[in-house]
Amino acid sequence: AWIRLGESEAFLRLLALGFWVATVPLLFLLGRRLVDERVGAIAAVAYALHGFALEWGQQFRGYTMAAFFTTLATLALARLLEAPTTRRGVIYGIVAALAAYSHFFAILVLGAHAVTALVAGRRMPRRPFVVAGLVGGVLLAPLGWFLLTAENDPISWVGEGSRSQVLDVVTDLAGGGTLPLIAYAAAGALGLLALRRSVVTRGWTESWPILLIGLWVVMPLAIAATMACH
């Protein structure tokens, strides 16, 4: 549909750029909801100036679309966990399905969502979460059928990985270079300490905002690295 509107190189790249720009305010809203406005502002600025995001924000590919919809789905999940209602469950199911259709690997983020919901939702009404699962399941049924019946492996293009390649990817995600990698590693360590402190003082159920952030960072990378190296 986008190609039908124009075929110049600059115009084609605008789609990915638009999703990249739209993700910046979403990250602010999400950070503010999970922690506070300062954290939201830091997240938004970090993404806006991030070399890896800037690089793919200029490519005519679907990665920035996936980033946008996974961020939007995470925001929808946060709203659902704050106040579980059937309406919010429906919204999350729809947005989560859109994220999965934008890129297969977005499903790894939905896995982090599922673990967070299981931990945080134990003392909450189950109906909204069941509705979210049903809506998402129905919408994802065609995608599941495609994956089961496709003649070729949809991710066969992913080559066999190695530890050095995993390190290279993590370095790229940190912004490139040793110093950003050390900075992000330090931020991750501080995040783990914050999670531990929150669990000790408030318990797992009330610590879901920090748990969600941690799982969002760790689970997709860990699963992808395991798949690539085996």
Image (cartoon, helix red, strand yellow):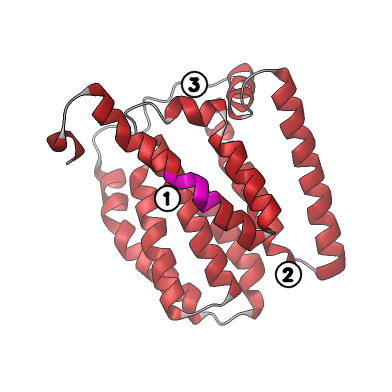
Magenta stretch: includes residue 26: yes
Q: Is residue 200 left or right of residue 162?
A: right
The residue indicated by pointer 3 is 160
Q: Amino acid at mark 2?
A: Glu
Q: Position of residue 47 (x, y in %)?
A: 56, 38
Residue 162 in which image quadrant: top right
Residue 193 seen in render: yes
Q: Position of residue 175 (x, y in %)?
A: 61, 25
Residue indicated by mark 1: 69
Q: Residue at x 51, y 45 (%)?
A: 24
Residue ID for mark 2:
206
Please state the extent of the stretch shown in magenta in the rendering. 22-27
Distance from Cα at disc 2 to Cα at disc 3: 40 Å
Q: Residue furthest left?
A: 4
Residue 16 lies in what quarter of the image? top left
Residue type of the residue flagged with mark 1 = Phe
- Say which label, 2 or 3, has the lower sequence index: 3
Give the number of marks: 3
Percent from the top left, x then y, of residue 77?
52, 64
